[in-house]
Image: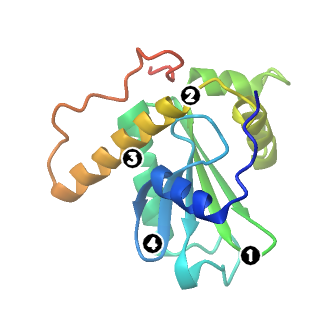
Amino acid sequence: MPVPPIQNTAVKGLLMDVLTIWESDDLRISQARNIYLPGYLVIERRGPTARSTGTTRERSTAIDSALELAKSILRDCLSPMRIYELDFANSDSIAVLHVIPGNAEVMRAVSRDTGSAPETQVEIAKAIWEAYGMNRTIYSAVEILNFVAHARAYCRSLHAQEPVRDQPRWPSSQRGAPTVL
């Protein structure tokens, strides 16, 4: 059964807090809210700097650092074969980066229609959104939250300059877990 969109802004705020992996005064890295794929990360500006003053290609050093952190989270937690970076700006000029793990399952999803890898960001996004969008139930909310918890622990370990103890890679033995190659 499809999950209806959340209309209550208080509930939306709580949900965002649950899915937030890392944040600073200006930026936030979160698990995507409407895409049920563990590791589909969204980097967005927050606070007074939310609106972009230039094109999506004119990224600040802070955004580039957040992008590197997001890719590091994916490499450490999921070991994807590839990492997709999709750069968007909506009609309000709010720049958003999507960072997506390209494991074997995702690679099949993005090449399903044509038999070859899509060439544009729009084609990649369309294929992933169709495969893992709100009406899909490949992964459960528990699996998504387990990934978020592991990603947060990884970020804390970077800050503490020590490895996360007793925290193996996000478990690939779970039902529906991403293929770790």
Q: Nearer the viewer, mark 3 or mark 1?
A: 1
Q: Position of residue 104 (x, y in %)?
A: 58, 21
User: Residue drawn 85% across and 24% down?
Assistant: 114
**What's the residue type where badge 2 is placed?**
Ser
Q: Nearer the viewer, mark 4 or mark 1?
A: 1
Q: Mark number for residue 140?
A: 2
**What's the residue type where badge 4 is placed?**
Ala
Q: Nearer the viewer, mark 1 or mark 2?
A: 2
**What's the residue type where badge 3 is placed?**
Ser
Taking depth in this image into account, of 4 and 37 the one nearest to the observer is 4
Q: Is residue 41 above or below residue 101?
A: below
- Spatial CA span between label 3 and label 1: 27 Å
Q: Position of residue 123 (x, y in %)?
A: 81, 41
Classify mark 1: residues with Cα within 10 Å, few (<14), some (14-19) or many (20+). Answer: some
- Sequence-earlier tag: 1 or 2: 1
- Sequence-earlier tag: 2 or 3: 3
- Spatial CA span between label 2 and label 3: 24 Å
Q: Which residue is mark 1?
A: 93
Q: Position of residue 38 (x, y in %)?
A: 52, 35
Q: Is residue 75 above or below residue 42?
A: above
Q: Which residue is mark 4?
A: 62
Under tag 4, what secondary structure? Answer: helix
- Sequence-earlier tag: 3 or 1: 3
Classify mark 2: residues with Cα within 10 Å, few (<14), some (14-19) or many (20+). Answer: some
- Sequence-earlier tag: 2 or 4: 4
- Sequence-earlier tag: 4 or 1: 4
Quadrant where the C terminus is found in the figure: top left
Q: Which residue is mark 3?
A: 72
Which of the 4 image quadrants contains residue 124?
top right
Which of the 4 image quadrants contains residue 147?
top left
Left or right of 80: which side holds 169?
left
- Sequence-earlier tag: 3 or 4: 4
